[in-house]
Amino acid sequence: MTNPRELGLLADCESCFGLCCVALPFSASADFAVDKAAGEPCHNLRDDFRCSIHEGLRERGFPGCTVFDCFGAGQKVSRVTYEGRSWRAEPASARQMFAVFAVMRQLHELLWYLAEALALEAARPVREPLRRALAETERLTRERPDVLEKLDVAAHRAEVNELLLRAGELARAGLNGREHRGADLIGARLAKADLRGANLRGAYLIGADLRGADLRQADLIGADLRGADLSGADLTGSVFLTQAQVNAARGDSVTRLPAALTRPAHWASASQAAGQAASQAAGQVAGGRSGGGRGRQSAGRRSRRR
Ligand code: SF4
């Protein structure tokens, strides 16, 4: 993958006006301790746009905050689109800024996927259209606020998605992977499953048991992995997997991830995972629908640094 840091696709909370902690709504659930309306600042957001409970988000009932990834959209809107003028300093621009943030997040997510697709050797036949799509998406991110607010981002997504679909197909070519696009695999028992080269685009894998599964070269774009158990699974070479998806799943120290992604701090160690497996074998609940009252994982939010 092209370096996401150089592309500005890694969230830099210190350069952001806490946009995800204000613009997005959440509902009291296993993911969030309280209700919050869109546009209302979270009561944990400090005056300096830092989170007052950053070190204890999971323990304080906000695990959903550890899942969200803005792909760098927060700092782009704060520092580029609005040139350092915050919604607190200019309340009249707040509504528009939050709308622009929602659009920018989608554009940055597309940039992430496009950069990954460009780095795929197998996607060489579509490299030129991918380059053009990346340049056009990057250009859109630098538009004025009023242009961004009205942008038909769904139409742009649809165009880019055709290219990503083709790139994913090329990456999986010849592997005869399973076809599970958009499949309902909630709580599915897929331990040690051979899912190499599988098409899991948009699949619902909430709470699925994927321990020890072979997910190499699988296309995981948009797959819902909340609460899925990836302990011991091999995801090297999987395509279009994001940090937010990984953060929403469970795993352990032997789960193998693509090089661009990092192991979440909350993942259990291999020994803890073994203990959990033993408990499950003894009859405790395994798999099933994970907690959380929100929709797709993109609805979560990233924790903000102190
Ligand atoms: S990270 Fe979560 S808890 Fe902290 S301020 Fe943001 S929304 Fe609130």
Image (cartoon, grey):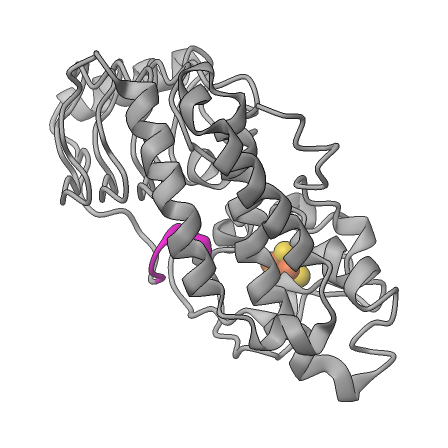
In x, y percent, where is residue 79? 83, 59
Q: Is residue 190 left or right of residue 222?
A: left
Residue 201 among magenta residues? no
Which range is magenta? 294-298
82 up-or-down from 288: above or below: below
Q: Quadrant of residue 183?
A: top left
Residue at the location (66% across, 83% down)? 95
Q: Is residue 35 left or right of residue 88?
A: left
Nearer to the camera, 118 or 269: 118
In x, y percent, where is residue 158? 38, 55
Residue at the location (22% across, 30% down)? 199
In x, y percent, where is residue 57? 59, 49
Q: Quadrant of ligand 1?
A: bottom right
Residue at the location (63% across, 25% down)? 2
Residue 295 among magenta residues? yes
Nearer to the camera, 63 or 155: 155
